[in-house]
Image: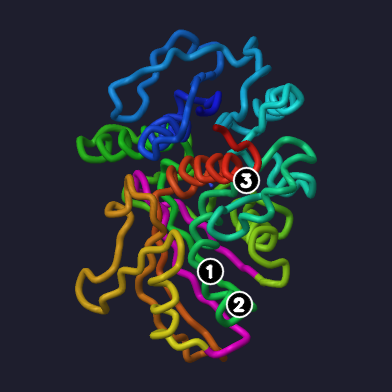
Amino acid sequence: MGYRIVVAGATGNVGREVLAILAEREFPIDELAAVASSRSQGTDVEIGDSGRTVKCQNIDNFDWTGWDMAIFAIGSDATAIHAPKAAAAGCVVIDNSSLYRMDPDVPLIVPEVNPDAIDGYKRKNIIANPNCSTAQMVVALKPLHDAAKIKRVVVSTYQSVSGAGKSGMDELWNQTRQIFVGDEKDIQKFTKQIAFNVIPHIDKFLDDGSTKEEWKMVVETKKILDPKIKVTATCVRVPVFVGHSEAINIEMEDELSAEDAQRILREAPGVVLHDKREDGGYITPVECVGDFATFVSRVREDPTVENGLNLWCVSDNLRKGAALNAVQIAELLGRRHLKKG
Ligand code: 2RA
């Protein structure tokens, strides 16, 4: 016996990955509904490489009654309208937007890191999925925090354009072609040229000069992993289609050698350590696309601070950073609270 599950935003970058991952992981489904805005109504959406399709329904008149859970990938404004309706009808919402992440009555879950927090979902019938850059970072930090208590994290991100949706990917593609053939560059989605460039700005600016993407990494890490951890972040958009990378500097309470950190990371759930200290002995974003893992490379001690470590962390932002984490939450919810059969 399986679940009646809804994928909201099924035609977007993340929604399509959710459908593919549900099929890849053989999530037990009795009935699957794909919903999106009225523009996509009637569109046949492919379920990954399974050869099957599902017809998209209009979210505005969708009846949520009798559905067990819904994975939302529709952005905060639409989520604010539809998530409360779904939750009130008894359908548990697993939300990819930032709307509920910091709501004290909504658990923010990365299954490898804080699975027990899911028990709080009943307060609103909503579970939040973290921001992509936070999700992969906390998967890498959790085992090191357990071993040596992390005090402070300094992170610089190298975030792919797919994090900004399909229009971000189109802009990188079009600008690259325009520059190549000598056409005028079209800049719409990003604030500056993204092809052959990097942009130190993701999401809107806050009063203190940081950006909302950087703020998310600070507050979400505290909520998921430990409120005592201090985080400072610089988030940068790079001309990569899929795969976010992060250079992470960690200061810990206790001593942890690079060798011990590697040993711990090798065993850690969700992590693949690939750290050969030779040409090519690390993972780059193009190599992580389509994978479930958070890859860690370049683990080394930082002698400029007490108990410091540096590492390089790469993951598919559409998967661990969004769709995969949401499906893992659905699996966890099923195991712990909505058992079938
Ligand atoms: C980005 N944080 O990469 C986003 C996606 N969630 O822009």
Foreground residue among 79 and 139: 139
- The residue sitting at 61% across, 55% down in the picture is 115
Foreground residue among 153 and 171: 153
**SS of the residue at dot 1?**
helix
Residue 291 rendering spot, x and y as whole percentages: 34, 49
> Callout 3, which amino acid?
Arg
> Callout 2, which amino acid?
Ile
Viewer-side label of 2, 3: 3
Query: Do callouts 2 and 1 mark residues in contact (Cβ within 8 Å)?
Result: yes
Question: Upstream in the sequence, badge 1 or badge 3?
Answer: 1
- Quadrant including the C terminus: top right
Residue 256 rendering spot, x and y as whole percentages: 50, 87
- The alpha-carbon separation of the residues under discs 2 and 1 comes to 8 Å
Can you say whether 279 is above or below 307 in the image? Answer: above
Query: Where is mark 3, residue-wise?
Result: 336
Task: Confirm whether the magenta stretch covers residue 232.
Answer: yes
On screen, residue 283 versus residue 22, left or right, reads: left
Residue 48 rendering spot, x and y as whole percentages: 34, 30
Viewer-side label of 1, 3: 3
Can residue 167 be seen in this snapshot?
A: no
Residue 205 rendering spot, x and y as whole percentages: 65, 50
Task: Confirm whether the magenta stretch covers residue 191.
Answer: no
- The residue sitting at 58% across, 74% down in the picture is 145
- The alpha-carbon separation of the residues under discs 2 and 3 comes to 29 Å
Query: Where is mark 2, residue-wise?
Result: 150
Q: Which residues are magenta?
A: 231-255
